[in-house]
Image (cartoon, rainbow, N blue to C red):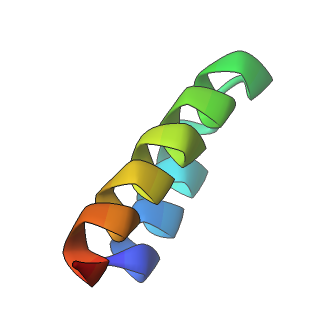
Amino acid sequence: MKEKLINAIKNHKLDHKHLNEVIKLAKEELNKTKD
């Protein structure tokens, strides 16, 4: 999951603002899966 996300970010070369959104969403997803 994490590797896929990193690859997606590299592939898209997201701008900083968008990158922060993606990271925020990813952290929320990770928190959901912990429970």
Residue at 63% from the left image edge and 38% from the top image edge: 13
Q: Residue furthest right?
A: 16
The quarter of the picture where residue 34 lies is: bottom left
How many discs mark residues in the rendered view?
0
Q: Residue furthest front?
A: 35
Viewer-proximal residue among 3 and 32? 32
- Residue 19's spot in the image, x, y percent? 64, 34
Q: Quadrant of the N terminus?
A: bottom left
Q: Quadrant of the C terminus?
A: bottom left
Determine whether, in the image, residue 15 is placed left or right of residue 22. right
Q: Please, is residue 13 above or below residue 32 in the view?
A: above
- Residue 11's spot in the image, x, y percent? 50, 50
Q: Please, is residue 3 above or below residue 20 in the view?
A: below
Residue at 49% from the left image edge and 56% from the top image edge: 27
Residue at 42% from the left image edge and 77% from the top image edge: 2
Q: Please, is residue 31 above or below residue 19 in the view?
A: below
Residue at 57% from the left image edge and 46% from the top image edge: 23
Determine whether, in the image, residue 3 is placed left or right of residue 24. left
Q: Please, is residue 29 above or below residue 16 in the view?
A: below
Viewer-proximal residue among 20 and 33? 33
- Residue 29's spot in the image, x, y percent? 31, 57
The quarter of the picture where residue 16 lies is: top right
